[in-house]
Image (tube, rainbow, N blue to C red):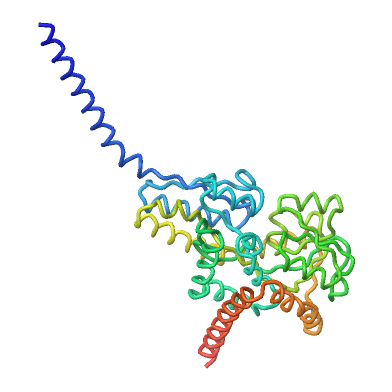
Amino acid sequence: MILKSMNLGARARAILLGSATTLLVSLAPQAASAVELNLTFLANEQDEEYDAAQVFKNYVESRTGGEVTVNIFVGAQLCGSANECFESIRTGVLDIYTATAGGTSAIYPPIQGMDIPYMLSGDRVAELTLKDPEFNRFIREKVLESSGGDIMVLSMTQTGGWRNFANTQREIRSPADVEGLRFRTIESQIQQQLVEEMGGSPTPVPWLEVYTALQTGVVDGSKNSISDIVNANLNEQLKYLTLDGHAYMASMWVMGKQVFDSLPPEQQQVVLDGAAMMSTVQFGIQPRKELESFKAWTDGGGEIYTPTEEEAEQFRTAAEPIRDWYLEEFGEDGQEFLDAFQAAIDRAESQVEESRASAMQ
């Protein structure tokens, strides 16, 4: 009788164990398919990056049937600088981040060549250059290699359009007018070199601290696009804006490679397609945001100056040594990058010229 009771208990335990195992097995695929991606950018909700992130979130979540969710973190909630954000990706706190070329130089230093002044001749050429498939492939390979396989580029785009000189002290009509002014830069040697070549003092300041730096006189100016200036309310401090267009604010959405590789192929494809949409959104929405930004600038009493062709040539001449400095600094790696960048520019210029010629026939 006792033995019979013991046998029944063992059988009951086996049944319970089997049921629990079956339950765990049935739940396992569902748990594995639930993915959360943390996405951040360091601007605010007025920035085009916010619009792009919202489009990406909707696209990924709807195309995966909710199996992948995207959490958007605005500003410095997860990290406060490019270096911190890249480290957060490596530690798994962050999955997707957008960085400028200057910020990405923390991983792949030669990419600073994208900030060599006055290389891009106009908006159409700039957009086609950054969308160039061969150039994109080159950047992906270099960033992945330089990050030790940790970080991959999802898409190339722009974040704000053209960089211009803006300051609190005086109108800048020529490079000589930059002399003695302290300009905020990121920790990018190219950007700092440009200010130095014109006689100014480059002062690295994190983006989220620029307003206070202008307010307290730590810096006299900043090299940003008009939309970025207004989005961050820097127009409340700045007064003079010179539309010299010394650099186009290229950026890229990047993702932790390990997280991307952990996704099944169909979800990887959705993420890549969503990232391509982010690029399109940022290119398209920027011109519209500029209209509002220029109005806010002038309504607030800000002054705008557009250099004459003669003055523009003075700016280009003053910046010429930067290319030589870049090649001396980065050697063969720098030459390799510039060759790839220039080839993409040449292809873009040819495409624009052909398009114009066709339309004007």
In the rendered view, does 71 fall on the left or right side of 177? Answer: left
Q: Nearer the viewer, residue 101 or 16?
A: 16
All told, the count of numbered labels is 0
Give the image quarter of residue 350. Answer: bottom right
In the rendered view, does 33 fall on the left or right side of 275? Answer: left
| Image location (x, y in percent) of residue 12 | 18, 18
Q: Nearer the viewer, residue 236 or 174?
A: 174
Looking at this rendering, what residue extends furthest in the front direction?
Answer: 3
| Image location (x, y in percent) of residue 108 | 60, 64
Q: Residue at x 18, y 18 (%)?
A: 10
Give the image quarter of residue 267. Answer: bottom left
Q: Nearer the viewer, residue 100 or 188?
A: 188
Looking at this rendering, what residue extends furthest in the bottom direction?
Answer: 361
| Image location (x, y in percent) of residue 242 | 79, 70
Q: Residue at x 22, y 23 (%)?
A: 16
Give the image quarter of residue 164. Answer: bottom right
In the rendered view, does 82 fall on the left or right side of 30? Answer: right
Please state, as top left, top right, bottom left or bottom right, where the N terminus lies in the image.
Answer: top left
Q: Residue at x 21, y 20 (%)?
A: 13
In the rendered view, does 355 fall on the left or right side of 224? Answer: left
Looking at this rendering, what residue extends furthest in the top direction?
Answer: 1
Q: Is residue 11 above or below residue 242?
A: above
